[in-house]
Structure formats: structure tokens, C-alpha cells
Amino acid sequence: MTVCAALLVAVVALGQAPEKRYGVKSATVKVVTNMMDQKVESVSYFDDFGAKELTVMEMMGMKMNQITRDGKMYIVNDAEKQVQEMPARDNINYLNLTPEIIKKYNVKEVGKEKVAGKDCIKYTAEIEQMGQKAQVSVSVWNGYAMKSNIDMGGFGISTEVVEFKEGPVDAKLFEIPKY
């Protein structure tokens, strides 16, 4: 996987952890990501308040599915019939901003913003990805990152939710393929 693809997976995974992450039980979310002058559209599905999540994206001609559940993250490459398993990331859970998390990531509430019709709280934070510190600005609604901007040493990525549809999702979406 290229560095860009790995970073995009990290961005999409912001806030992912095995506990309840979102204040909404289930939803389908369409996101636009801009990175290196390239626009990437993705769709995420989540259930059980974010305990199970699937993100489907295509980048540089490569389709990638990322499933997070049971405290693990799975990168699924259907074309090569491969599944890569790894621990779910230990990132910021905006529904549970403990003093430890606030200190660890230098989280600061800096204002409010409306994204995709949702009234969001805007935060700044510092995260570490691939051994580098990144400056993050994120607008959050019900624990979900509706918009984010990440600057990692001059390399920037922005994401924005363009549609957030609450409602049930198919449980089969979160099944790990057996190749």
C-alpha cells in the first residue's frame, strides 16, 4: 500500500476505537477527501454506535475496503483477494473526551461550524501518524468527524461529509471475506 493510501486510511479512521464512538446507532455517510490535488469519494457505513464500520473508497484505480469491528481493523483488497488484519487505531473518541485524551492529543475546542446540515463543534488536536506529528482541525457532530483538515509537515488532507443518512445498514457489510 502506498504512503498516500496508508495516510488516507488513517484519516478515515480518525476517532476509531472499539467502544461506542458515535451518538447515532447506524448510518450511511458519503465523504469527499482532497489529497495531493486528487479528489477521493468514499462511503462509510456504521452500526452499533460505531462499534462496526465499513469504509469503501477508490484511490488511484485501487478499490479499498476498511472494516473496523471487535477492536480490529481489516483492509480488504477484493482484486487480490487479500485481507490484512491489524489492531484498531487508538485515536480520539469525541464522545469520551477524558482529561487523559485531551492532554495526550492536545485537544482544544475552538468554535462551531455547520457541515452537511449538522451543527458541529470544532476542535484542534495533534496526532501522530507514521512517526510524524500532524496538526488536525476537525468539526464533530454526535462524535462523528464531519469535516477535517490534517497538516503533516506541509502535506495536507481535507475531508468533508457531503451526506449523512441515519438509519439501519445491512449487517453483512461488516463480514470479513474468507478468501
Image: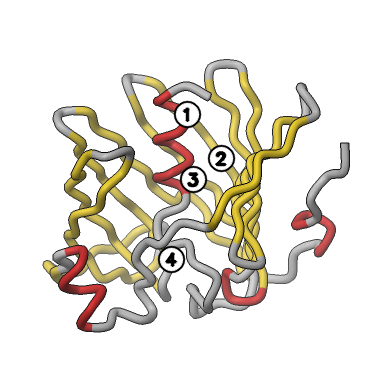
Mark nearest the camera among 1 and 4 is: 1
Q: Nearer the viewer, residue 174 or 161?
A: 174
3 or 1: tag closer to the N-terminus: 1
Q: Is residue 58 above or below residue 165?
A: above
- Kind of residue at disc 2: Ser
2 or 4: tag closer to the N-terminus: 2
Q: Which residue is mark 4?
A: 144
Q: Position of residue 112 (x, y in %)?
A: 20, 69
Q: Decide: few, some or many residues near mark 1? Use Cα within 10 Å; few <14, some 14-19, many ≥20.
A: some
Q: Decide: few, some or many residues near mark 3? Use Cα within 10 Å; few <14, some 14-19, many ≥20.
A: many
Assess whether mark 1 and mark 3 are in contact (beta carbons under 8 angstroms).
Answer: no
The Cα–Cα distance between marks 2 and 1, rounded to whole angstroms, is: 13 Å
- Kind of residue at disc 1: Ala
Q: Position of residue 6 (x, y in %)?
A: 45, 33
Q: Position of residue 30 (x, y in %)?
A: 55, 48
- Kind of residue at disc 4: Tyr
The Cα–Cα distance between marks 3 and 1, rounded to whole angstroms, is: 16 Å
For the C terminus, give its image quadrant.
top right
The Cα–Cα distance between marks 2 and 4, rounded to whole angstroms, is: 15 Å
Assess whether mark 3 and mark 2 are in contact (beta carbons under 8 angstroms).
Answer: yes
Q: Which residue is mark 3?
A: 31
Q: Position of residue 24 (x, y in %)?
A: 55, 77
Secondary structure type for disc 1: helix
The Cα–Cα distance between marks 4 and 3, rounded to whole angstroms, is: 12 Å
Name the residue located 56 percent from the left edge and 40 percent from the top edge: 42
4 or 3: tag closer to the N-terminus: 3
Q: Which residue is mark 2?
A: 42
Q: Which residue is mark 1?
A: 5
